[in-house]
Image (tube, grey):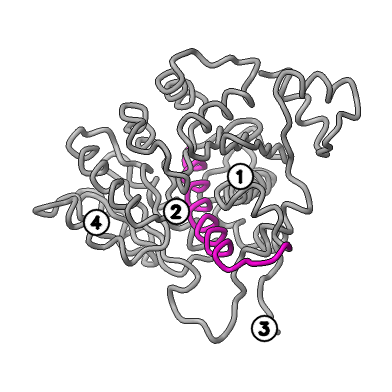
Amino acid sequence: MFSLISYILRFTKFTTQPRSSHYETLRSCSGQFETLSPKLIGAISQCIPKLTFDKHKGQSGRVCVIGGSVEYTGAPYFAGISALRCGADLCTIVTSADAATPIKSYSGELIVLPDFNAVDPAKAITSCLARYHTVVIGPGLGRDPVKLQIVEKVLREIKERKLPLVIDADGLHLITQRPEIIQGYQKAILTPNAIEFDRLFTKVCNKIPNEEEPIMDVKLLAKTLQVTVVLKGSVDIVSNGAYVLVVGTETSPRRCGGQGDLLAGFLSIFSYWTHLKRTQTYDNQQKHLKLYGPTMLAAVAACAMTRECNRRAFAKCRRAMLASDMIDEIGAVFEDMFGSQTDCQI
């Protein structure tokens, strides 16, 4: 894997034809891929709704994060606050009663519902789905079998409503047990780390991943499940089974907890925006959106945001850097990467 990654980091400009023996070697073993480029960033920027005075609360995105447990209250907070800082208008955390109060105490910006302790939890959660534009499942969820059964019922309703969906952390544990419940849902994005990917790939593809072929393995898993997969790592590999995008921009060696939760939050709101843009686009100006689809563009945007927030926070805090330090970088990183997205002179 490391030799392959070194090729990716060294050669970042995409061409349809190899320009060197290095590209020839890379493509012969892993097929074609595109890396983050100004054109891709421009395509993503066109999907972001502009800030205007004529909008009302909620139009720029209402996010639902399903997760949290008595052990893990920070994860859903990080996912929710990153979506808000990125530009979502509202975020609701659906969690258990023993996690609700700690999460509420972290931020007054988050709506927190202890629906896992309702008389009929699945009904309580699904009855609220009409409020949301996009859903994240998994941050801090835990692996309680009863809880996972509830989530499985909620997943069915999410698919019925055709909501953009991000599945992370313990949500991936459920998918590894029951991959058929997500198979074929093309609005889903799975965000495994290396260990989670190995387990899921082995279950779905019935073989052990090849460490020398991470790009092909990600593509195969995505193709088999018919979803978008983001393999997080020293480079982030994104595939919908047909295409591969690689984000290898600079980051830092600091790997504190919470960074994957920030990524999930970014993904949720970008996925809503890119799906919304696809319904509004009728010309040829959005060729990248038409080629790769909304989930892949959202994934590239979220990976790029996470990596740059990490880099800037580490430059200031070094070894003391925490995920909360990355939150402080979101606003500036977003504007530097995608522009202010407003016509208002303020």
Q: How crowded is mark 4: few (under 14 residues within 10 Å), some or many (20 or more)?
A: some
Give percent across and percent down for residue 35: 74, 40
Q: In this view, does 110 lie above or below 177?
A: below
The residue depicted at 70 percent of the width and 84 percent of the height is 345
Q: Which amino acid does label 4 sit on?
A: Thr
Q: Which amino acid does label 1 sit on?
A: Cys
Q: Which mark is residue 126?
A: 4
Q: Is residue 259 magenta?
A: yes
Q: Which mark is residue 303?
A: 1
Q: Residues within 10 Å of mark 2 (few under 14, many from 20)?
A: many
Mark 2 or mark 1, which has the lower sequence index?
2
Residues 331 and 185: in front is: 185
Which image quarter: residue 9?
top right
Q: Residue tagged by mark 3?
A: 344
Q: Give the range drawn in magenta.
A: 257-284
Q: What element carries label 4?
A: helix
Mark 3 or mark 1, which has the lower sequence index?
1
Q: What residue type is labelled 3?
A: Cys
Mark 1 or mark 4, which has the lower sequence index?
4
Marks 3, 4: nearer the viewer: 4
The residue depicted at 52 percent of the width and 33 percent of the height is 222
Q: Residue tagged by mark 2?
A: 164
Q: Is mark 3 on a helix, strand or loop?
A: loop
Q: How crowded is mark 1: few (under 14 residues within 10 Å), some or many (20 or more)?
A: many
Q: How far apart are marks 3 and 2 (CA)?
A: 29 Å
Q: What element carries label 2?
A: loop
Marks 2, 1: nearer the viewer: 2
Q: How many marks?
A: 4
Residues 278 and 297: in front is: 278
Quarter of the rendering occupied by the C terminus: bottom right
Give percent across and percent down for residue 260: 50, 41
Give percent across and percent down for residue 152: 26, 41
